[in-house]
C-alpha cells in the first residue's frame, strides 16, 4: 500500500470518527443496547412532562378497557399528544375517561364534572362523574 493511500484512509477514519462523535453515534448506540424501549421513549417524550408518554403508558397498562383514552396536554401549543402511541383501531375513544398531561390547578377547574382516579405530579387520570 502506498503512503498516499494510507494517508487518505487515515484521513477518512478521522473524519468518520469526528462525524460519529458530533452526532452522538456512540452514545446513542450504547443507549439503544442498554435501555429497553419504554425507558428510551420516556427519556424522549417524558414521564409526566413534555408529551407525558410515561404516565400515559402507566394508565394504559393499569386500566385495560374496550376503548381508547383521550389524552389532553395542557401545553398543547408546545407538545403533541401521545394517545396515538396506544391507539387500538378496533376501539373507539371514550369521553368518560381522560388523561391530562401538564395540567395545573387552574386548568383542572375546566373538568369540574370529573373525579380524579390517578394523580402524579401535574398529570391526572380522570373519570366523568355520575356514570
Image: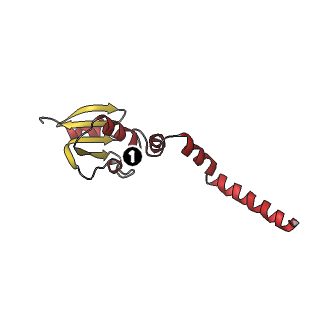
Is 119 left or right of 91, judged from the image as shown? right
- Decide if residue 104 is in sight here: no
- Place of residue 55 in the rendered image (x, y in percent of width and height, measured from the top left): 36, 38
List the residue tagged with mark 1: 51
Is 21 left or right of 10, judged from the image as shown? left
* Quadrant assignment for the C terminus: top left
How crowded pointer 1 is (Cα within 10 Å; few <14, some 14-19, many 20+) is rated as many
Q: Nearer the viewer, residue 20 or 46?
A: 20
Q: Nearer the viewer, residue 117 or 34?
A: 34
**Which residue shows up at 49% across the image and 41% down it?**
36
- Place of residue 27 in the rendered image (x, y in percent of width and height, measured from the top left): 61, 46
* Quadrant assignment for the N terminus: bottom right
Residue 99 in which image quadrant:
top left
- Place of residue 42 in the rendered image (x, y in percent of width and height, measured from the top left): 45, 41
Q: Nearer the viewer, residue 55 or 1?
A: 1
User: Helix or strand or loop: what does disc 1 sit on?
Assistant: loop
- Place of residue 95 in the rendered image (x, y in percent of width and height, measured from the top left): 19, 45
Amino acid at each position: 500500500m502506498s503512503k498516499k493511500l494510507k494517508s487518505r484512509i487515515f484521513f477518512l477514519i478521522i473524519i468518520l470518527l469526528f462525524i460519529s462523535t458530533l452526532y452522538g453515534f456512540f452514545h446513542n448506540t450504547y443507549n439503544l443496547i442498554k435501555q429497553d424501549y419504554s425507558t428510551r421513549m420516556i427519556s424522549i417524550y417524558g414521564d409526566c412532562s413534555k408529551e407525558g408518554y410515561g404516565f400515559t403508558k402507566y394508565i394504559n397498562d393499569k386500566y385495560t378497557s374496550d376503548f381508547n383514552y383521550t389524552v389532553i396536554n395542557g401545553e398543547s401549543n408546545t407538545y403533541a399528544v401521545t394517545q396515538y402511541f396506544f391507539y387500538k383501531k378496533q376501539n373507539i375513544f371514550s369521553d368518560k375517561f381522560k388523561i391530562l398531561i401538564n395540567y395545573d390547578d387552574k386548568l383542572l377547574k375546566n373538568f369540574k364534572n370529573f373525579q380524579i382516579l390517578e394523580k402524579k405530579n401535574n398529570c391526572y387520570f380522570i373519570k366523568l362523574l355520575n356514570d
